[in-house]
Every structure is written in structure tokens, then in C-alpha cells.
Image (cartoon, rainbow, N blue to C red):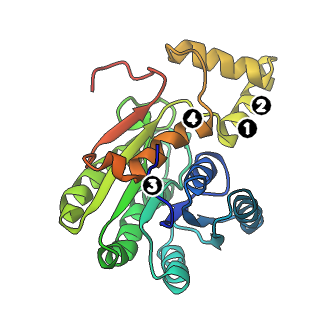
Amino acid sequence: MDLGLEGKVAVITGASQGIGLAVARGLAAEGVDLFLCARNEGKLKEAAASIAADYGVKAEGVKADVSEPAGVDRLVRAVEAAAGGTDILINNAGAGTEETIMEAPDEKWLYYWNLHVMASVRTARGFVPSMRKRGGGVILNTASICAKQPLSYEPIYNTTKAALVMFTKCLANEVVKDHIRVNTVKPGLILTPDWLKTATILGAKEGITPQQYLDRIAQQNTPIGRFATPEELAHTYVFLCSERASYSLGASYYVDGGWLKVVD
């Protein structure tokens, strides 16, 4: 299926590994030029060089911390200078948390609010003007199944991702007149480096291997009985970036192997 994405420009935050990197490679396979954003400059350079070599597209890394206004400004300026703006924006930067509401300090709440919500607000303000000039665009925000079905040990993550879903809906209604489509993707169990790190640490405490730990989590939570690869998830992003998804607006798409336990 020709998705009609060749020659488009995409900006992806949290793009040096995991979901963001898989989405970058999926878009590159469709002929999309890329700006990859993350904090680790070494990983960014490696990812950009690999994508350019494998797919023959332009791929540039921009080191920036999008949890801070200055980081978003740096990203927007770099893209504007090099490409005059973007057609696709994927807000993917984020991280899990672990705390209780009673013990988590304000500083932790504010950091993740900035990372999961305000980063998307600020990148939208930064890139929507260039999308308007280009005749439209697509924005995808990475939320989580936890925005609907919370995990007990990460209330900050649950809350900020739920807020991101509402922001997405509001933004979608505001910019649809500019031919900009905004949607949310809500992943479930995706085998990212963070999950591998968690499985290694917690598995060791229980005397089991990381794979045994991951298998147990998947069997306990998902009817499909396994984690998805980032590449499996990336297919959904690539489709939603294309005109094949032209009627998708302000929606949330679960990619969770059946983990969600209610009808939504």
C-alpha cells in the first residue's frame, strides 16, 4: 500500500531508542526525511546515520530536552532553519515513574507534567505555524494504556498521560480547520529498553531471568500473552501519519494486545 508519505518531513521526540526509533525507521522506509530529538547526542548521531544509510533519506539528530521550554525552542529553531518546518510531529518523549501520591514531592509531579504534557503543548505551538504554511500536517502524541487503566505504582505517569489524551482532543478540535490531524496512540506492553532494564533488576531480585519476568508480566496481563516489539507498534504510527487515515481525528488508538479490560 502506498501511504503517500515520500518527501514529507517528520519530527520525533524521544527518538534515540525504543518506540521513537522504531517509528523513525518506519517512516524512513516510506521516504520521510527525519529530525530525531533526544538528550543523548551519541545515540542520536548513531541513529540518524544508520537510518540515512539504510533508507536513503535525510536524517538529522537534534539534542534537546523537551521537558524545558529552551529545549523545545532549540528543536523548533533547528527544524525551521534546516527544512522550513515539518509535516509530521510525533511527541514521544516520556518515561515511567514509581512513587506514591502521599510521598511524591511537587518537584517530581512538575517534572513529569512538563515532560508528558507541556512538551506537547510547546511543540504544538512551535510547529503548527509551519504546518499551516505547508497546507496541513499530522500530530501524534504517545500516551499509554495507563491513561485509562492505571498502574498502582505510577500515579504521576497515569495522571500526566491522561492529561495528554485530553490535550490531544482539545488540540485536534482547534487545528482541524488548518487541515492538521491530531491523534493519540496508547501502547500497552512494548518491549522497550526501559522494560528490559526493569526486568533485569526485578528478575534478579526474584532469582529469575529477565525473559522469565517479562513472560510472566505478559501472561498475567494480556490475552495475546506477549510483549509487542517497537516495530509492531510503529506500523500504527506510520499509518496514522498518512492520508489513508484522513478521517482519524482526536481519537485514541490502543495497541495493547487486549490488555484493556473495559470497552472504550
Above or below — where is 49 with respect to 195?
below
Q: Nearer the viewer, residue 201 or 13?
A: 13
Front disc: 2 or 4: 4
Tell me residue 21's x, y (percent): 63, 52
Callout 2 touching callout 1 (CB < 8 Å):
yes
Indicate which disc residue 167 carries: none
Task: Give the farthest residue toward the front.
Answer: 2
The residue beneath circle 4 is 232
Badge 3 vs badge 4, beta-carbon distance below 8 Å? no
Which numbered disc, 2 or 4, marks the residue that appears first in the sequence? 2
**Mark 2 touches mark 4? (CB < 8 Å):** no
Number of numbered discs: 4
Label 2 sits on a secondary structure element that is: helix
Separation of residues labelled 2 and 1 (CA atoms): 5 Å
Q: Nearer the viewer, residue 262 or 9?
A: 9
Secondary structure found at label 4: helix
Asked if 256 appears above or below 181 in the picture, the reply is above
Residue 5 percent location from the top left of the image: 46, 58
**What is the crowding at mark 3: few (fewer than 14 residues within 10 Å), some, or many (at least 20)?**
many
Residue 116, disc: 3
**Identity, as a three-letter code, of the amino acid under mark 2:** Thr
User: In the rendered view of the protein, which quadrant contains the C terminus?
Assistant: top left
The tag earlier along the polypeptide, 3 or 1, is 3
Q: Which residue corresponds to the image point at 37% horizontal and 78% vertical from the top-left?
A: 130
- The residue pinned by badge 1 equals 197
Q: Are marks 2 and 3 in contact (CB under 8 Å)?
A: no
Callout 4 amino acid: Glu
